[in-house]
Image: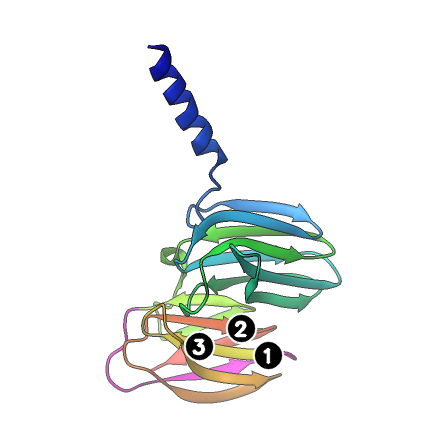
Amino acid sequence: MLLRSLAVLALTLATLLIPATAHADKSYTGVGDQVLRIRLTKSPGLLTLTHTGESNFIVTTVNSSGKQEQLLANEIGPYKGTVLYNGDGTTKSIAAVQIKADGAWSAVFKPLSKARCWCTATMKGTGDQVLKLSPTRGLRTVTAVHIGESNFIVQSYTRLGSWGDLLFNDIGSYQGSSVLPAGTRLVTVKADGPWTLKRR
């Protein structure tokens, strides 16, 4: 009986010591620089970030060797957006997320299923965002409008674990159109201002 109780206690302690999986809607808040340790994962997911400071806000993933892998956010001043991590399949398993900030911030890990749905032809937003849609078929195009001063980058993914197709890559205000690859099921937007995407 004693041995069984000890075994249960050991299992309970081990469970408490394992960092929460990155896909379990785990939320973190803090002020200034911090490193968030997570359960080792190669799986892609979403990270929703906010920052209320006035200086640099830089967020990167870190592998188990302590090497920085993917730059998720790099802005100056306030920030609010959702980004994709482990999307291209080229990074090693990540073990942590490093945050550099001068103000208060929040970070929420979410599964891909919680990406914003691009359910109608026209989608509007502001800042960084990840959009999910039913896989496209045949010839489809997307028209983009961005009103901002910094990078405007839009990528499409037919499957995760491979490089996405670059649809738009410009600086400042932009208007143009591009082919939306057949089979696209996920689109990432990097922007510092309001944007509109319209597919047909």
Instruction: Identify the secondary structure beneath mark 2.
Output: strand
Cβ–Cβ under 8 Å for marks 2 and 1: yes
Dividing the picture into quadrants, the one containing residue 44 is: bottom left
* Mark 1, residue position: 151
Q: Could you tell me which quadrant the N terminus lies in? A: top left
Instruction: State the residue at coordinates (41%, 72%).
Output: 187
Q: Could you tell me which quadrant the C terminus lies in? A: bottom left
Question: Does the magenta-highlighted stretch encompass residue 2?
Answer: no
Left or right of residue 160, residue 167 in this image: right
Which contiguous range is marked in magenta? 134-150
Residue 7 vertical position relative to residue 54 in the rendered view, above or below:
above
Residue in front for this viewpoint, 34 or 114: 34
User: Local crowd at mark 1 within 10 Å, few (<14), some, or many (≥20)?
Assistant: some
**Quick one: label 2 or label 1, which is nearer the N terminus?**
1
Q: The residue under label 1 is which amino acid type?
A: Asn
Query: CA–CA distance between discs 2 and 3?
Result: 9 Å
Dividing the picture into quadrants, the one containing residue 171 is: bottom right
Instruction: Identify the secondary structure beneath mark 1.
Output: strand
Cβ–Cβ under 8 Å for marks 2 and 3: no
* Mark 2, residue position: 190
Residue 92 vertical position relative to residue 103 in the rendered view, above or below:
below
Left or right of residue 36, residue 184 in this image: left
Residue in front for this viewpoint, 59 or 122: 59
* Mark 3, residue position: 155
Question: Does the magenta-highlighted stretch encompass residue 140?
Answer: yes
